[in-house]
Amino acid sequence: MTVTLHFHGAAGTVTGSCYRIVHPGGQFLVDCGLFQGNRTVRELNFKPFPFDPRHIDFVLLTHAHIDHAGLLPRLAHLGFKKPIWMTEPTSGLLEYLLPDAAGIQESEAERVTRKAARRADPPAKPLYSTEDAAATLKLRRTLAYGEWSEPGPGVRARYWNAGHILGSASIELEVRDGGDKTIRMLFSGDLGPDQKVFYEGPDAPSDYDYILAESTYGGRERDDYTLEQRREALKGEINEALGRGGNLVIPTFAVERSQELLHDIGVLIRDGDISPSLVFLDSPLASRITAVYRQHAGMFEDLELSAEALFNDPRFRLVDGVEESKAINSIRGGAIIMSASGMCEAGRIKHHLRNNLPRGNATVLFVGYQAPGTLGQIIQSGAREVRIHSDLVPVRARIRSLGNYSAHADHSELVDWVTRRLPAHGAIFLTHGEDEERAALRTALMHDDGLAGDQVLMPMLDDQFELRAEGVAGVAHPERPRLDMGQVALDWHNAYANFLIELSNRLQAETDDRHRLELMTQLTAALGGGRGVGGSSAKPATHRALHGGAGDE
């Protein structure tokens, strides 16, 4: 029997990381992450797994980000009860991340249920519950960097620092093929950049049969920078934003990005480079995650400001309660407001955006990747109006982006990481990236390292590969793809919302009601309708509306 590798997530998309290895001794997963992005991509979370969770022997987790760990409670809900292996800091982060994710699922189901009740539709069910999250936490097992472990028969695993977030790991694997050979693999997980505030860059040995490398920023380079230059760029953005008289709103991720921003803002305040009136971290989850970072402060390399010194400044506010969060809305200027989620898809950031986007003197600063179709990406792309909580919100605020806070390696750093891990005797699989980014990284690896096209592969969702030490022996594709890849960049839900916004703008721009009705009649005819907008022929409908007949009947 051979070893097969199945790509059940992060294949053609950036999220939903999930790989399944089937071998003579059983089967296991590397990661089990939530699909994030537009509505079509998110709907994958509710579709059945392409495997039976009860038959999975264990899970190896690279790190705590929800797109790598967020479907673990779903896995547990469907019968998985085996160990989940991770580093100790990852275990500490999951203590808060999984219950928070479950709370979001339950709240979203409640919101959908309230809307469904008005249509007499059945209630919505959450993807998973807080009870499922609690059951998942009981399955955690921890191991240290650099130490071999045997999570199951015929499998050895060793974790290496990935430099991405606290506790993140690349996973080295040795899997017996049922004969006298061992398949050696390396899963990169998410890789961090060379310049980090808290700890050293990624590490792992070289010489494998197969390497799976993330490609989030393939083809994209950040400007070279030092930590001092990054703070200088942040200083410029903050001073310009506050100089306009409004607030600075920063959508940020609860893990890593919030802590790095807090640290850099604290250093800038200490040095007299900026002087905001107040600095809010309005995210209960981010506040709790910050406590985990304080617990593991001994791992950090470049910490210039202790947590005690940072939070002793009276301008810093860690906001937990709902009423305190609502009170921030009364502040018209001079404040820095950091809040989750980083892609603006959920959480308190949507309230702060709804209040500040219409203000011409406000600034919104993006400091992380915005997946296609997310609210953050739509704002970042220059939309003049966005829909938040079912309301149309005009975008008058100044929109800015700062790329030097990404927790991901850029193109050159990815190429360098892979090059340092070579040779890969069988193949390199590029994952966790959109097709354009994966193609750019593939081209670079072929050019820089002299690799052939069949040595650098771009698997798609649910593809499976038969692995042998000497190379890929076979490839199988799913009969029915779970995802239409054409819907990843812009699905029909977003296209529909944009269409309604454009239609509303066009109707409002018309000079009178006659022209508005004519436009609506033309649209109805284009859609194949045989009658006008009013339900009869176009002319009578227009006549009645213009003369008040419809209102008098």
Image: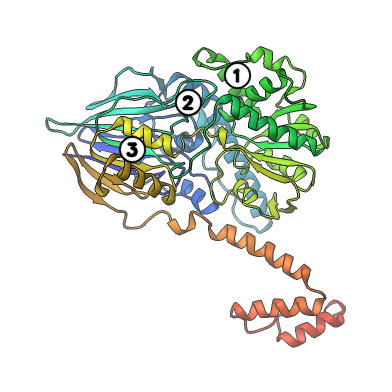
Classify mark 1: residues with Cα within 10 Å, few (<14), some (14-19) or many (20+).
some
In the rendered image, the vertical position of residue 103 relative to residue 458, given as above or below: above
User: Which amino acid does the dot numbered 3 rest on?
Assistant: Leu
User: Which amino acid does the dot numbered 1 rest on?
Assistant: Ala
Q: Earlier in the sequence, mark 2 or mark 3?
A: 2
User: Which amino acid does the dot numbered 2 rest on?
Assistant: Leu
Query: CA separation, marks 2 and 1?
Result: 18 Å
- Percent position (x, y) of residue 204? 34, 25
Where is the C terminus found, in terms of image quarters? Answer: bottom right
- Percent position (x, y) of residue 262? 65, 24
Rendered residue at 43%/54% (across/down): 483
Classify mark 2: residues with Cα within 10 Å, few (<14), some (14-19) or many (20+).
many
For disc 2, the marked residue is 137
Label at residue 212: 3
Q: Would residue 335 appear left or right of 437 to someone viewing this image?
A: right
For disc 1, the marked residue is 291
Residue lying at the far left of the rendered structure = 180
Looking at the rendered structure, the secondary structure element under dot 3 is strand
- Residue 31 seen anywhere in this rendered image of the structure: yes
- Percent position (x, y) of residue 436? 43, 51
Rendered residue at 25%/31% (across/down): 208
Which one is in front in this view, the residue at disc 1 or the one at disc 3? 3
In the rendered image, the vertical position of residue 218 relative to residue 144, given as above or below: below
Rendered residue at 57%/16% (across/down): 303
- Percent position (x, y) of residue 91? 47, 22
